[in-house]
Image (spheres, coloured by chain):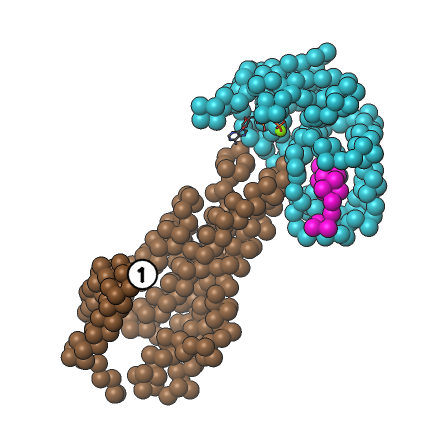
Chain colours: A cyan, B brown
Amino acid sequence: MNSLISLEKVNYQIADQHILHDVDWQIPAGAHITLTGPSGGGKSTLLRIIAAMISKTSGTLIFDGQPIESYDPIMYRRQVSYCFQQPTLFGETVADNLAFPYQIRKQVMDTQRVVTALNNVGLSERTLHQPIIELSGGERQRVALIRNILFLPKVLLLDEVTAGLDENNKQIVHAWLRQLNEQDHVTTIMITHDATEIAAADQLAKVVAGRLEVHA
Amino acid sequence: MNLAVNNTSLFLAAMLVLVALGISLWQKLGLDRDIVIGVVRAVVQLFIVGYLLKYIFRVNNLWLTLAMMGFIIFNAAWNAKKRGPGIDHALAISLLAIFVSTGVTLGVLVLSGAIKFVPSQMIPISGMIASNSMVAIGLAYRSLNSQFHDQRQGVLERLALGAGLLDASIAIVREAIRTGMSPTIDSAKTVGLVSLPGMMSGLIFAGVDPVRAIKYQIMVTFMLLSATSLGSIIACYLAYRNFYNEQKQLE
Ligand SMILES: Nc1ncnc2c1ncn2[C@@H]1O[C@H](COP(=O)(O)OP(=O)(O)OP(=O)(O)O)[C@@H](O)[C@H]1O
Ligand SMILES: [Mg+2]
C-alpha cells in the first residue's frame, strides 16, 4: 500500500544527545494514529520533524512521493499541520488568531466557517471577540486547534491537544477529529498519555527512548 | 563673540575632574582609574578632532569631506553592530541602513537649501544624523533579539500554521522599529521644555539670536525623525531573516 508519509532510518541528534534512533515509519493516507510512550521519549520531536519545524539529522522522509527537502517549507507546513503541546495564542483576541490563516493566504476571514469550527469544538460565536487573556486553558487549547484546520491540511499532527480538557470536551474534540478523518480524509497522528484514548486507538504507535514501536 | 575659553581657563576647569576623582576615592567607588583614562582620552581625541576639522575646513576639498563623512558613517555602523550580538552581517546591514538614512536626510537638507555643501556644515550634521541613526538601530537590534527570545513560542506557532517568515515576524519587526524611533519622537515632544538641545545651545552660546537658533533646532528635529525611521526600518527588515535558518525554521 502507498504511504502518504514514509520515514526511513530517521535520526535526530543535538550535540552528543541522540534523541531519535533509526525511526522507520509508513503512514498510509487516511490513517488515524495514536502515538504514545513515556515522557521524554521523543514523540514531540518526531512530529516536529514530520511537520518541518525542525530537521532530522539523517535518514529520509518522503511526503506524497517526494523527499521533504524538495518542498518549500512554508507550503509544506500548510499541508502537514502541527498543533503544539501547550500552545499559546498570539495577538489580542481570538479573532486575531483565527484570522491569521486567512491573512497569510491574503484572504479575508470566512466568519461563517470560523463560527462553525468554534461550534464544532463546543465554543460559541461569542468567543470570537473575547480577549485571549480571558480564556480558560481548555478554551485556548481548542482555539489553537481550530487555527490548524480552517484550511484543511492533508495531515494533522496533534501534540497532546486534549490534555487540558474535561471529559465532556474531550468527547466533543474526539468526535470532531474523527469526523475530520472520516469525512474530510485528513490523516491524523495524535500524541496522548490518556489511557482511554490509548484504549480506543485504531492504530497505536509508541516512542520509547527514541525508538518507534508500531502496533498493528 | 564673547567666547572666553582658553588654555588657562580650561586648566582651572580641570579642577572639576578632581571633584569626581575625590568622590570616587572617598566613597571607594573604584572609578578613579576609569575617570583618569576617560579624561585623558576625551582631551586627546577632541584635540585631534579639532585640528583635523580645522585642516579639513581650510582645504575645503570635496573628496576629503566625503571621506570624513564616510569615516563617520563607518564608525556609527561599527557601534550599531556591537549592539546586535548574534545577528549575522550586522555590520553590512548597519552600514547600509546608516548610509541610506544619512544620505537621504542630508540630500533633502542640501536640496532644500537648509544647509550648504561645505565641510563645516556637512561634517557636523552628518555626525548628528549618523549617531542618532546608530542609536536607533542599536535599540532596534536589541528589541529584535529580546522579542525573538521572549516570543519564541508565538513565532513557532505562526510558522507551524504555514506563515512566511515576514508574516511570522511582522509583529516583532514593527515593535523593533517603534523602539528605534521612540526616543526621537519623545524628545521631539519635550524639546525646549526640558533641555535646550546641543545645536541650539551651541548657536546661542556663539551669540546667535535665539529665534534663528531655534530654526536650526527645528531642522534638527525633522532630520532626526527621518534618520531614525529610515535607519530602523532598513535595519529591521534586513535583520529579521537572520533569526531563521535555510529551512525557514526558527534558530
Ligand atoms: N531543543 C532541544 N534541546 C535539547 N534537548 C531537547 C530538545 N528538544 C528535545 N530535547 C530532548 O529530547 C527528548 C525528547 O523530547 P520530546 O519533547 O520529543 O519528548 P516527548 O516524548 O514529547 O515527551 P512528553 O511526553 O513529556 O511531551 C527529551 O529528553 C528532551 O529533553
Ligand atoms: Mg511532547
Does the segment drawn in magenta span residue A154? no
Which residue is more in the foreground, A47 or B125? A47
Name the quadrant containing residue B107: bottom left
Q: Range of the magenta residues? A: A132-148
Which residue is more in the foreground, A121 or A67? A121
> What x and y, as percent, mark residue B129?
39, 66
Vertical position of residue A47 compared to residue B90: above or below: above
Vertical position of residue A173 compared to residue B128: above or below: above
Q: Is residue B112 found left or right of B121 in the rendered image? A: right
Q: Which residue is painted at 47% across and 79% down in the image?
A: B193
Which residue is more in the foreground, B22 or A38? B22
Within the displayed image, which quadrant is ligand 1 positioned in? top right
> What x and y, as percent, mark residue A129?
77, 52
The residue pinned by badge 1 equals B72
Q: Which residue is painted at 44% across and 68% down in the image?
A: B224
* SS at circle 1: helix
Q: Is residue A15 visible?
A: yes
